[in-house]
Image (cartoon, helix red, strand yellow):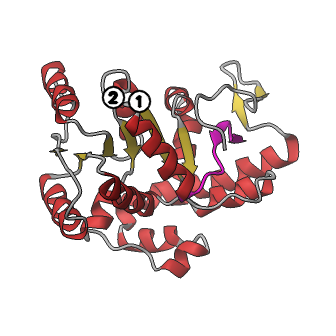
Amino acid sequence: MTSILGIHVSASNYGSVVAKSLEWARSYDSRVLVFANVHVLMEAVDSPAYRDCLSQADIVSPDGVPLVWALRLLGKTEASRVYGPDCTIAMLKSAEERGVPVGFYGGSPEVLEALLGVVRRDYPLLQIPFAMSPPFRPLTPDEDDEAVEQIARSGARILFVGLGCPKQERWMIEHREKIPVVMFGVGAAFDFIAGIKPQAPRWMMNYGLEWIFRFATEPRRLARRYLKNNPRFVLLFIWQLLTGRTTVRREPGGEITNRLNLDTPHGGASD
């Protein structure tokens, strides 16, 4: 594992993530996989609770090209992007081939219906015993218990969670001991695979310019995320490279101190 701004990110690849996930699924393990980009890391910088949440994930893969560049600058020259939507597709294909049941949790009813249509068309032999679009509000304890029971009873071994960052990561960690499934926090993958939202051209993705495409298509929703987080990430990562420290924090008394987070324990698979 390599620390980027105090978050341990694995220099994984599609093959290793799929293989490890299938191994866990066959063993009825409860595991959490996170696909991290700049937005995810900056949420963790701003929220100690969310940082702790990510530290409990089994694999944190570099979903964004800037994180791949960061890993390489930190010595992980073999690092490559593990893009959530592409990894979801690779996982669906492997699950179909190996008879591993999968489920989906998240998205609006319209998005989930469109997603299931595409998945059933492209992977006709895939077992999908569970799919749920939860309401866009906090669930009551009874509703949450019912959802957990349905997932556990369904027999799904892999669960794709599309609640968005940071909600999906918090949900997965909160429920990992209750559901014997391998959980993938895949964010907007539901919308992309269903064809609801357009994806950036591959050449833009390859050059780390996907954020420009997404900003152009959803400026109001994404303005704060990109215009605030991207420059902060660059500055904080340069600070890490120059000092070996992950960030600078202002203490309650006004004193600015450097917090070393490079050796923070992280539960998860090795690179």
Give the percent coordinates (x, y) of residue 5: 68, 41
The kind of residue on which mark 1 rests is Asp
Q: Nearer the viewer, residue 252 or 22?
A: 22
Q: Nearer the viewer, residue 104 or 45?
A: 104
Write down the residue under mark 2.
180
Label for residue 194? none
Give the percent coordinates (x, y) of residue 145: 18, 22
Q: Residue furthest right?
A: 242
Name the quadrant containing residue 113.
bottom left
Q: Are marks 1 and 2 in contact (CB under 8 Å)?
A: yes
Name the quadrant containing residue 64.
bottom right
The kind of residue on which mark 2 rests is Pro
Which residue does the image show at 17% across and 40% down from the upper left? 134
Which residue does the image show at 45% across and 74% down from the upper left? 213
Write down the residue under mark 1.
29
For label 2, the SS is: loop
Is residue 63 visible in the rendered image? The answer is: no
For label 1, the SS is: loop
> In the figure, is residue 154 to the left or right of 244?
left
Within 10 angstroms of label 1, few (less than 14), some, or many (20 or more) residues? Answer: some
> In the figure, is residue 268 to the left or right of 225?
right
Q: Nearer the viewer, residue 233 or 150?
A: 150
Quadrant location of the C terminus? top right
Looking at the image, is 202 positioned above or below residue 5?
A: below
Name the quadrant containing residue 143.
top left
Query: Mark 1 and mark 2: span between their CA atoms?
Result: 6 Å
> In the figure, is residue 40 to the left or right of 184?
right
Give the percent coordinates (x, y) of residue 58: 53, 35
Q: Per the image, is 78 magenta?
A: no
The residues colored magenta run 1-14
